Image (tube, rainbow, N blue to C red):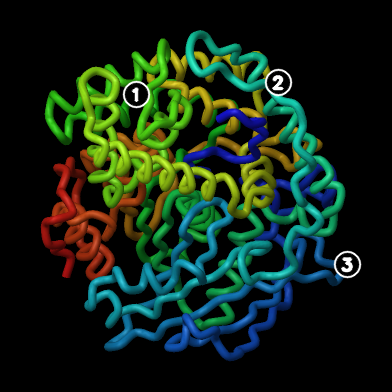
Amino acid sequence: MRRPLVILVTVLGLVSTGLVSHGLVPGGPTAPATAQEAPRQETALSWHRCPKDLAEWRCATLTVPRDWVNPADGLTVDVELAVRSATGDRIGALTFNPGGPGGSGLDAAPLIYALLPNRVKAAFDFVAFDPRGIGASQPQLKDCLPSASRESYVPPDTGPVDWVAFAERTQEGTAAQLGPCWEANQDLAPYLGTDYVVEDLEAMRHELGYDDWNIWGMSYGSRIAYRYARAYPDRVRAMILDGALPPSMTISEWAANEAWAFTYAQAVFGSLFGDRMAARLDRILRTLNDRTVVINGRERTRWGITLGIFSGISSQAEYPTIVKLIDTVYDAMFRTASPARQRQAARDLERLERLAEKDRSGEVYSINMINCADLGSPPSVEQVASFAEAGYVNSSVAAGFVATTKGTLCAGLPMPIAVPYPAPEKMLELRTPPVVLNSLGDTRTPWAGARTLASSIAGAWFITYLGTQHVTWLRTTSACVNKRITDYLMTLKRPGSHSCDYAPLKEAPDAR
């Protein structure tokens, strides 16, 4: 990690305000009218040929107002979508958002569709879309290349971390990149928030001719799903909030959560592989604060090792790699690790580091713009440092690192971008209550936030998966999760609230 740590987004991905529902501040309209109260604006749907990876789909461009509240300027955005028709007797339409914010629904569509049980494919049109400004949708943010490298606080390999200095430098670096991006994109940046996406989703439903939606909100997608349901409760048949975010929170609350989210992840992951693994992981994390370790001839520090472990811990597919990595690092620190094991560990670390870099590099500016519009109330540098210190003390430098990047996410933006989304005054009531599910040790959307979301929706069923997987339905082999969710979607059968045991991937799934 001997390079400037100028970061725009969290290493672990993650994660609206009332842009539409409550009006805007700098860069947008000032009228407080709501999109739901305004006359429905004209939209257009034009079908076109799909790209090769969506050859069996039907693709279209949905043209909608750039500003749903004040569309008089005539400016529009094009939202790209794709439909895979039901293979049998159709019940309705199922749509999803893969998270981010900034995830491309079209890019994810083939993989997600392949996961669906056959009876779901038979019963639902499957609709994928790229939210405004994302993926194939147009226009997109432009002229947002990172600024030149600058001197930054480089945290020490061992010993105390000056989290105030780290937060200050991270904030300065983010502002140097994000501020010019905002200034260069006044025609689009203020109109990327989730409430605009909600209106796009309603226009999509109308243009496609569906009576209602079945919505699978993954991670950030749970925010879209929840806000759509609040705006259009009669247009929701079924809703799955998977890896879910709380109904309202601020940037400060989001960053502060790292003080305990990583602690839960460490405890849950360790418990899946016995007391020996839990003890080894704990000893590694503690010892790396005082010393480094040489693996395959290269000195490794707490920064690379802990960020590597925690960048993969939210995916069960990475569990075998992480277990072997922990065992090899432990033996290299306290015993003897063979050259072959060290070479493999070095390769695994490098791959996990690339995974972390990919998390940081995606639709970075859109992630900032959307979250800062949606959440508001960024903390002070001193508050960020206190969140980071708490995460560091409770878990590792990884928690402090992510708390810092989340807490400084809005540096350089004229906050607030929009009026913050208000805490709900009453519970959301739907014709059929939704299912909320979350892993107990999820670092990307911590369990407590999902529990809070479930408590804000009348009759919602809450399923806890006893693992660390982020987004759980069909991503694990747990019949306790998969069959209940599938049955709910197909029949609206009450799944009940459950705690579902960890299911290793080697077990055959049972969701059909």
Query: Amino acid under label 1?
Result: Thr
Q: Nearer the viewer, residue 425 or 391?
A: 391
The tag earlier along the polypeptide, 1 or 2, is 2
Which residue has dot 1 on it?
Answer: 263
Single out the mark in the foreground, 3 or 1.
1
Q: Residues within 10 Å of mark 2 (few under 14, many from 20)?
A: many
- Name the quadrant of the C terminus: bottom left
Residue at the image position 47 percent from the left and 40 percent from the top = 12
Label 3: element kind:
helix
Q: Which mark is residue 184?
A: none
Residue at the image position 41 percent from the left and 14 percent from the top = 291
Q: Quadrant of residue 411 in the image?
A: top right
User: Mark 3 and 1 residues: CB-CB less than 8 Å, in contact?
Assistant: no
Determine the CA span between mark 1 and mark 2.
25 Å
Q: Which mark is residue 73?
A: 3
Determine the CA span between mark 3 and mark 2.
40 Å
Q: Nearer the viewer, residue 1 or 117?
A: 1
Label 1: element kind:
helix
**Residue 437 visible to the viewer:** no
Single out the mark in the foreground, 3 or 2.
2
The tag earlier along the polypeptide, 3 or 1, is 3
Query: Amino acid under label 2?
Result: Glu
The tag earlier along the polypeptide, 3 or 2, is 3
Q: Is residue 140 above or below residue 162?
A: below
Residue at the image position 59 percent from the left and 32 percent from the top = 405
Which residue has dot 2 on it?
Answer: 168
Determine the CA span between mark 3 and mark 1.
50 Å
